[in-house]
Image (cartoon, rainbow, N blue to C red):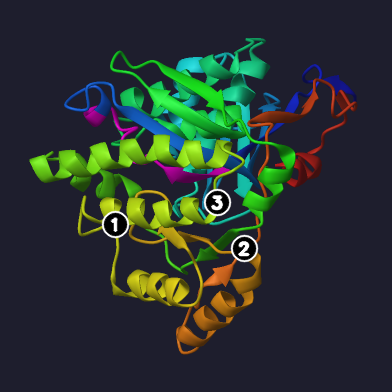
Amino acid sequence: MLRRFWGDTLVIIVRSPLRVSFFGGGTDHPTWFKGPGSGRGAVLSTSINKYVYLTLRQLPPIFDFKYRVAWSIVEQVKEIADIRHPVVREVLRHYADEKCGYEVSFNSDLPARSGLGSSSAFTVAALNAISKHCNRTLTKHELCAEAIKIEQDYLQEPVGCQDQVAVGYGGFNRIDFHKDGAFTVNPVDISPKRLRAFEGHIMLFFTGFTRDAGNIEKAKFQNITPEKEKSLNTLYDLVDKAQNIVEDPRASLSDFGYLLDETWQAKRSLSKEVSNPAIDGIYDTAVANGAYGGKLLGAGGGGFLLFFVPPDRQEKVRSAIRTLSADWDHPPVEVPVSFESEGCTTVLYQPDYDSSHIYEFGKKDLIKYA
Protein backbone atom coordinates (compact mmCIF):
# COMPACT_ATOMS: atom_id res chain seq x y z
CA MET A 1 0.00 0.00 0.00
CA LEU A 2 1.37 3.41 -0.96
CA ARG A 3 1.09 6.22 1.58
CA ARG A 4 2.35 9.81 1.42
CA PHE A 5 4.11 10.77 4.65
CA TRP A 6 5.76 14.13 3.90
CA GLY A 7 6.67 16.59 1.20
CA ASP A 8 10.07 17.36 -0.23
CA THR A 9 13.03 16.42 1.97
CA LEU A 10 15.20 19.42 2.82
CA VAL A 11 18.96 18.95 3.11
CA ILE A 12 21.40 21.77 3.88
CA ILE A 13 25.18 21.41 4.17
CA VAL A 14 27.17 24.34 5.55
CA ARG A 15 30.89 24.67 6.09
CA SER A 16 32.71 27.16 8.29
CA PRO A 17 36.48 27.65 8.12
CA LEU A 18 38.73 27.40 11.13
CA ARG A 19 40.91 30.40 11.96
CA VAL A 20 44.42 31.40 12.98
CA SER A 21 44.66 34.39 15.32
CA PHE A 22 47.97 36.22 15.09
CA PHE A 23 47.60 39.21 17.41
CA GLY A 24 45.19 40.69 19.92
CA GLY A 25 43.71 37.51 21.37
CA GLY A 26 42.33 38.29 24.83
CA THR A 27 41.43 41.89 23.99
CA ASP A 28 38.33 40.53 22.20
CA HIS A 29 36.86 39.40 25.53
CA PRO A 30 33.89 41.59 26.56
CA THR A 31 35.11 41.68 30.16
CA TRP A 32 38.07 43.63 28.80
CA PHE A 33 36.87 45.83 25.94
CA LYS A 34 33.60 46.73 27.65
CA GLY A 35 35.38 47.34 30.94
CA PRO A 36 38.87 48.64 31.77
CA GLY A 37 39.95 48.25 28.17
CA SER A 38 37.90 51.35 27.29
CA GLY A 39 37.06 49.97 23.86
CA ARG A 40 40.63 48.87 23.11
CA GLY A 41 39.90 45.49 21.61
CA ALA A 42 41.25 44.27 18.27
CA VAL A 43 42.65 41.15 16.62
CA LEU A 44 44.59 40.36 13.46
CA SER A 45 43.54 36.96 12.14
CA THR A 46 42.82 34.85 9.10
CA SER A 47 40.54 31.99 8.22
CA ILE A 48 42.26 28.87 6.85
CA ASN A 49 41.42 26.07 4.45
CA LYS A 50 40.40 23.63 7.17
CA TYR A 51 36.70 23.41 7.91
CA VAL A 52 33.83 22.36 10.14
CA TYR A 53 30.99 20.77 8.15
CA LEU A 54 27.38 20.66 9.34
CA THR A 55 24.50 18.80 7.72
CA LEU A 56 20.93 19.74 8.55
CA ARG A 57 18.04 17.56 7.40
CA GLN A 58 14.37 18.04 8.11
CA LEU A 59 13.15 14.78 9.62
CA PRO A 60 10.01 13.17 8.23
CA PRO A 61 7.34 12.71 10.93
CA ILE A 62 7.47 8.92 11.09
CA PHE A 63 9.93 8.32 13.94
CA ASP A 64 9.28 8.09 17.66
CA PHE A 65 11.71 11.01 18.11
CA LYS A 66 11.69 14.51 16.67
CA TYR A 67 15.37 15.47 16.86
CA ARG A 68 18.46 13.47 16.01
CA VAL A 69 21.90 14.93 16.76
CA ALA A 70 25.04 13.02 15.80
CA TRP A 71 28.26 14.14 17.44
CA SER A 72 30.51 12.16 19.83
CA ILE A 73 27.23 10.49 20.78
CA VAL A 74 23.97 10.06 18.88
CA GLU A 75 20.95 11.68 20.47
CA GLN A 76 17.36 10.88 19.53
CA VAL A 77 14.88 12.92 21.56
CA LYS A 78 11.35 14.29 21.35
CA GLU A 79 11.92 17.69 22.93
CA ILE A 80 14.52 20.39 22.22
CA ALA A 81 15.11 20.79 25.96
CA ASP A 82 16.32 17.17 26.10
CA ILE A 83 19.13 17.73 23.57
CA ARG A 84 22.49 17.44 25.33
CA HIS A 85 24.58 19.24 22.72
CA PRO A 86 24.43 22.81 24.05
CA VAL A 87 24.85 24.72 20.78
CA VAL A 88 22.36 22.59 18.85
CA ARG A 89 19.86 22.87 21.71
CA GLU A 90 20.04 26.67 21.91
CA VAL A 91 20.09 27.24 18.15
CA LEU A 92 16.97 25.10 17.74
CA ARG A 93 15.30 26.63 20.80
CA HIS A 94 15.72 30.22 19.62
CA TYR A 95 15.81 30.05 15.82
CA ALA A 96 14.17 26.89 14.47
CA ASP A 97 10.64 26.24 13.24
CA GLU A 98 9.15 24.42 16.23
CA LYS A 99 6.78 22.50 13.99
CA CYS A 100 9.69 20.74 12.26
CA GLY A 101 11.88 17.87 13.33
CA TYR A 102 15.58 18.01 12.52
CA GLU A 103 18.62 15.82 12.10
CA VAL A 104 21.96 17.57 12.71
CA SER A 105 25.34 15.99 12.13
CA PHE A 106 28.81 17.43 11.81
CA ASN A 107 32.51 16.72 11.48
CA SER A 108 35.72 18.70 11.28
CA ASP A 109 39.00 18.56 9.40
CA LEU A 110 40.95 19.09 12.66
CA PRO A 111 40.39 18.26 16.35
CA ALA A 112 38.04 20.34 18.45
CA ARG A 113 39.28 22.36 21.45
CA SER A 114 42.62 22.95 19.78
CA GLY A 115 42.76 26.74 19.46
CA LEU A 116 41.43 27.15 15.92
CA GLY A 117 37.94 28.40 16.76
CA SER A 118 36.13 25.15 15.98
CA SER A 119 33.41 25.68 18.60
CA SER A 120 32.43 29.04 17.14
CA ALA A 121 32.77 27.67 13.61
CA PHE A 122 30.17 25.07 14.53
CA THR A 123 27.88 27.67 16.12
CA VAL A 124 28.07 29.88 13.02
CA ALA A 125 27.43 26.89 10.74
CA ALA A 126 24.43 25.70 12.78
CA LEU A 127 22.90 29.16 12.85
CA ASN A 128 23.48 29.61 9.12
CA ALA A 129 21.81 26.27 8.32
CA ILE A 130 18.75 26.88 10.51
CA SER A 131 18.32 30.39 9.12
CA LYS A 132 18.43 28.98 5.59
CA HIS A 133 15.82 26.39 6.50
CA CYS A 134 13.52 29.09 7.92
CA ASN A 135 14.04 31.32 4.85
CA ARG A 136 15.76 34.03 6.90
CA THR A 137 18.60 35.81 5.14
CA LEU A 138 21.35 36.96 7.49
CA THR A 139 24.19 39.23 6.46
CA LYS A 140 27.64 38.15 7.59
CA HIS A 141 27.53 40.80 10.29
CA GLU A 142 24.15 39.56 11.57
CA LEU A 143 25.29 35.94 11.47
CA CYS A 144 28.36 36.69 13.57
CA ALA A 145 26.47 38.90 16.03
CA GLU A 146 23.84 36.21 16.60
CA ALA A 147 26.53 33.55 17.07
CA ILE A 148 28.15 35.72 19.76
CA LYS A 149 24.74 36.06 21.43
CA ILE A 150 24.27 32.28 21.43
CA GLU A 151 27.62 31.59 23.07
CA GLN A 152 27.81 34.51 25.50
CA ASP A 153 24.16 35.17 26.39
CA TYR A 154 22.25 31.91 25.92
CA LEU A 155 25.06 29.52 26.89
CA GLN A 156 26.84 31.91 29.29
CA GLU A 157 30.24 30.74 28.05
CA PRO A 158 33.28 32.84 29.10
CA VAL A 159 34.47 33.28 25.51
CA GLY A 160 35.62 36.20 23.40
CA CYS A 161 34.16 37.59 20.19
CA GLN A 162 36.89 37.10 17.61
CA ASP A 163 36.23 33.50 16.55
CA GLN A 164 32.62 33.98 15.50
CA VAL A 165 33.56 37.01 13.37
CA ALA A 166 36.70 35.48 11.87
CA VAL A 167 34.97 32.31 10.64
CA GLY A 168 31.77 34.07 9.64
CA TYR A 169 33.48 36.65 7.43
CA GLY A 170 36.54 34.71 6.29
CA GLY A 171 39.72 36.30 4.98
CA PHE A 172 42.78 38.01 6.46
CA ASN A 173 41.32 40.80 8.58
CA ARG A 174 41.71 43.26 11.37
CA ILE A 175 38.65 43.03 13.62
CA ASP A 176 37.95 45.83 16.13
CA PHE A 177 35.66 45.46 19.15
CA HIS A 178 34.00 48.51 20.63
CA LYS A 179 32.80 49.37 24.11
CA ASP A 180 29.14 49.21 23.08
CA GLY A 181 29.58 45.62 21.87
CA ALA A 182 29.75 46.45 18.17
CA PHE A 183 32.53 45.18 15.91
CA THR A 184 34.04 46.24 12.59
CA VAL A 185 35.93 44.13 10.06
CA ASN A 186 38.59 45.54 7.75
CA PRO A 187 40.50 43.33 5.30
CA VAL A 188 44.28 43.55 5.49
CA ASP A 189 45.65 45.54 2.55
CA ILE A 190 48.26 43.19 1.13
CA SER A 191 49.24 42.35 -2.45
CA PRO A 192 48.74 38.77 -3.71
CA LYS A 193 52.51 38.31 -4.07
CA ARG A 194 53.24 39.45 -0.51
CA LEU A 195 50.35 37.34 0.79
CA ARG A 196 51.87 34.23 -0.83
CA ALA A 197 55.23 35.05 0.73
CA PHE A 198 53.52 35.55 4.09
CA GLU A 199 51.71 32.21 3.83
CA GLY A 200 55.01 30.56 2.98
CA HIS A 201 56.34 31.45 6.44
CA ILE A 202 53.55 29.69 8.34
CA MET A 203 54.18 26.39 10.11
CA LEU A 204 51.44 24.84 12.24
CA PHE A 205 51.96 21.95 14.67
CA PHE A 206 49.34 20.08 16.68
CA THR A 207 50.72 19.53 20.18
CA GLY A 208 48.81 16.27 20.57
CA PHE A 209 46.51 17.40 23.36
CA THR A 210 43.45 19.59 23.66
CA ARG A 211 42.13 21.76 26.49
CA ASP A 212 39.05 23.43 27.97
CA ALA A 213 39.25 26.98 26.61
CA GLY A 214 36.43 28.20 28.82
CA ASN A 215 38.25 27.45 32.07
CA ILE A 216 41.43 29.09 30.81
CA GLU A 217 39.57 32.21 29.65
CA LYS A 218 37.80 32.39 32.99
CA ALA A 219 41.13 32.28 34.81
CA LYS A 220 42.48 35.12 32.66
CA PHE A 221 39.64 37.53 33.35
CA GLN A 222 38.51 36.70 36.87
CA ASN A 223 40.73 39.43 38.24
CA ILE A 224 42.24 42.03 35.92
CA THR A 225 45.22 43.22 37.93
CA PRO A 226 47.37 46.19 36.87
CA GLU A 227 49.87 43.66 35.49
CA LYS A 228 47.20 41.96 33.38
CA GLU A 229 45.92 45.32 32.21
CA LYS A 230 49.42 46.21 31.06
CA SER A 231 49.71 42.89 29.17
CA LEU A 232 46.33 43.33 27.48
CA ASN A 233 47.21 46.86 26.38
CA THR A 234 50.47 45.48 24.98
CA LEU A 235 48.52 42.80 23.07
CA TYR A 236 46.29 45.51 21.61
CA ASP A 237 49.20 47.75 20.60
CA LEU A 238 50.88 44.85 18.83
CA VAL A 239 47.90 44.57 16.46
CA ASP A 240 48.72 48.01 15.04
CA LYS A 241 52.40 47.19 14.73
CA ALA A 242 51.78 43.84 13.04
CA GLN A 243 49.26 45.29 10.61
CA ASN A 244 51.72 48.01 9.62
CA ILE A 245 54.40 45.41 8.91
CA VAL A 246 52.08 43.27 6.79
CA GLU A 247 50.73 46.18 4.76
CA ASP A 248 54.06 47.94 4.18
CA PRO A 249 55.74 46.27 1.17
CA ARG A 250 59.10 47.71 2.32
CA ALA A 251 58.91 46.07 5.75
CA SER A 252 60.67 42.76 6.38
CA LEU A 253 58.34 39.88 7.16
CA SER A 254 60.85 38.73 9.77
CA ASP A 255 59.65 41.63 11.94
CA PHE A 256 56.20 40.06 12.00
CA GLY A 257 57.72 36.88 13.42
CA TYR A 258 59.60 38.75 16.13
CA LEU A 259 56.36 40.46 17.12
CA LEU A 260 54.71 37.05 17.44
CA ASP A 261 57.30 36.16 20.05
CA GLU A 262 56.50 39.38 21.89
CA THR A 263 52.75 38.70 21.86
CA TRP A 264 53.36 35.14 23.07
CA GLN A 265 55.33 36.37 26.07
CA ALA A 266 52.58 38.87 26.92
CA LYS A 267 49.89 36.20 26.55
CA ARG A 268 51.77 33.79 28.83
CA SER A 269 51.75 36.41 31.57
CA LEU A 270 47.93 36.45 31.71
CA SER A 271 47.63 33.04 33.36
CA LYS A 272 49.81 30.10 34.35
CA GLU A 273 47.29 27.92 32.47
CA VAL A 274 48.31 29.35 29.10
CA SER A 275 51.45 27.24 28.70
CA ASN A 276 53.24 24.25 30.24
CA PRO A 277 56.74 22.71 30.08
CA ALA A 278 55.94 20.57 27.03
CA ILE A 279 54.65 23.55 25.04
CA ASP A 280 57.58 25.69 26.16
CA GLY A 281 59.97 22.93 25.04
CA ILE A 282 58.51 22.82 21.53
CA TYR A 283 58.49 26.60 21.29
CA ASP A 284 62.08 27.03 22.44
CA THR A 285 63.25 24.27 20.08
CA ALA A 286 61.59 25.93 17.08
CA VAL A 287 63.07 29.35 17.86
CA ALA A 288 66.53 27.86 18.45
CA ASN A 289 66.37 26.25 15.01
CA GLY A 290 65.30 29.21 12.92
CA ALA A 291 61.76 30.33 13.75
CA TYR A 292 61.44 34.09 14.11
CA GLY A 293 58.70 33.59 16.65
CA GLY A 294 55.36 31.97 17.23
CA LYS A 295 52.54 31.43 19.67
CA LEU A 296 50.06 28.91 20.94
CA LEU A 297 46.72 29.45 19.26
CA GLY A 298 43.50 29.96 21.16
CA ALA A 299 43.15 30.29 24.91
CA GLY A 300 46.24 28.22 25.65
CA GLY A 301 47.01 24.98 27.47
CA GLY A 302 47.22 22.83 24.33
CA GLY A 303 46.10 22.66 20.74
CA PHE A 304 48.10 24.16 17.87
CA LEU A 305 51.43 25.96 17.92
CA LEU A 306 52.01 28.49 15.15
CA PHE A 307 55.53 29.38 14.03
CA PHE A 308 56.71 32.03 11.59
CA VAL A 309 59.72 30.54 9.80
CA PRO A 310 61.52 31.53 6.59
CA PRO A 311 61.13 28.75 4.00
CA ASP A 312 64.84 27.91 3.94
CA ARG A 313 64.81 27.11 7.69
CA GLN A 314 61.60 25.13 7.85
CA GLU A 315 63.14 21.69 7.37
CA LYS A 316 65.55 22.35 10.23
CA VAL A 317 62.65 23.35 12.52
CA ARG A 318 60.65 20.34 11.39
CA SER A 319 63.51 17.93 12.07
CA ALA A 320 64.31 19.45 15.47
CA ILE A 321 60.72 19.13 16.67
CA ARG A 322 60.57 15.57 15.35
CA THR A 323 63.75 14.68 17.26
CA LEU A 324 62.56 16.43 20.43
CA SER A 325 59.34 14.45 20.52
CA ALA A 326 60.66 11.08 19.36
CA ASP A 327 59.82 9.43 22.68
CA TRP A 328 56.42 11.06 23.16
CA ASP A 329 53.25 8.98 22.97
CA HIS A 330 51.65 11.66 20.79
CA PRO A 331 54.39 13.69 19.08
CA PRO A 332 53.48 17.04 17.47
CA VAL A 333 52.06 16.71 13.96
CA GLU A 334 52.64 19.36 11.31
CA VAL A 335 49.48 20.47 9.49
CA PRO A 336 49.96 22.42 6.23
CA VAL A 337 47.44 25.24 5.81
CA SER A 338 46.71 28.12 3.50
CA PHE A 339 44.44 31.13 3.84
CA GLU A 340 40.85 31.23 2.63
CA SER A 341 38.51 34.16 2.04
CA GLU A 342 34.94 32.85 1.79
CA GLY A 343 34.01 32.43 5.45
CA CYS A 344 30.91 30.44 6.35
CA THR A 345 29.23 29.21 3.17
CA THR A 346 26.35 26.99 2.13
CA VAL A 347 27.75 24.02 0.25
CA LEU A 348 24.38 22.44 -0.53
CA TYR A 349 20.83 23.76 -0.33
CA GLN A 350 18.51 21.12 -1.72
CA PRO A 351 14.80 21.33 -0.91
CA ASP A 352 14.07 18.09 -2.73
CA TYR A 353 17.30 16.16 -2.28
CA ASP A 354 15.42 12.89 -1.93
CA SER A 355 12.90 12.83 -4.76
CA SER A 356 11.23 9.67 -3.43
CA HIS A 357 8.32 11.41 -1.76
CA ILE A 358 6.10 8.36 -1.70
CA TYR A 359 7.22 5.24 0.20
CA GLU A 360 5.79 1.82 0.80
CA PHE A 361 6.60 1.04 4.41
CA GLY A 362 6.34 -2.30 5.99
CA LYS A 363 7.73 -2.95 9.46
CA LYS A 364 11.06 -4.11 8.05
CA ASP A 365 11.44 -0.98 5.95
CA LEU A 366 10.77 1.33 8.87
CA ILE A 367 13.36 -0.42 11.03
CA LYS A 368 15.92 -0.25 8.22
CA TYR A 369 15.26 3.44 7.59
CA ALA A 370 15.57 4.37 11.27
Q: Residue at x 41, y 25 (%)?
A: 176
Please, what secondary structure does the residue beneath circle 3 have? Answer: loop
Quarter of the rendering occupied by the C terminus: top right
Please, what secondary structure does the residue beneath circle 1 have? Answer: helix
Which of the two discs, 2 and 3, labels the residue nearer the N terminus?
Answer: 3
Q: Residue at x 61, y 35 (%)?
A: 104
Rounded to the nearest angstrom, the CA distance separating label 2 from label 3 is 25 Å
Residue 210 percent location from the top left of the image = 41, 60
In the rendered view, tell whether residue 215 sits above or below residue 189.
Answer: below
Quarter of the rendering occupied by the N terminus: top right
Q: Which mark is residue 232?
A: none
Q: Residue at x 63, y 13 (%)?
A: 134
Camera-near label (2 vs 3) is 3
Q: Which residue is mark 2?
A: 335
Q: Amino acid at mark 1?
A: Gln
In the rendered view, tell whether residue 131 sits above or below residue 288.
Answer: above
Q: Is residue 29 magenta?
A: yes
Neighbour tally class for label 2: few under 14, some 14-19, many 20 plus, Cα within 10 Å: few
Q: Which residue is mark 3?
A: 252
Quarter of image, res 204 = bottom right
Rounded to the nearest angstrom, the CA distance separating label 2 from label 1 is 24 Å
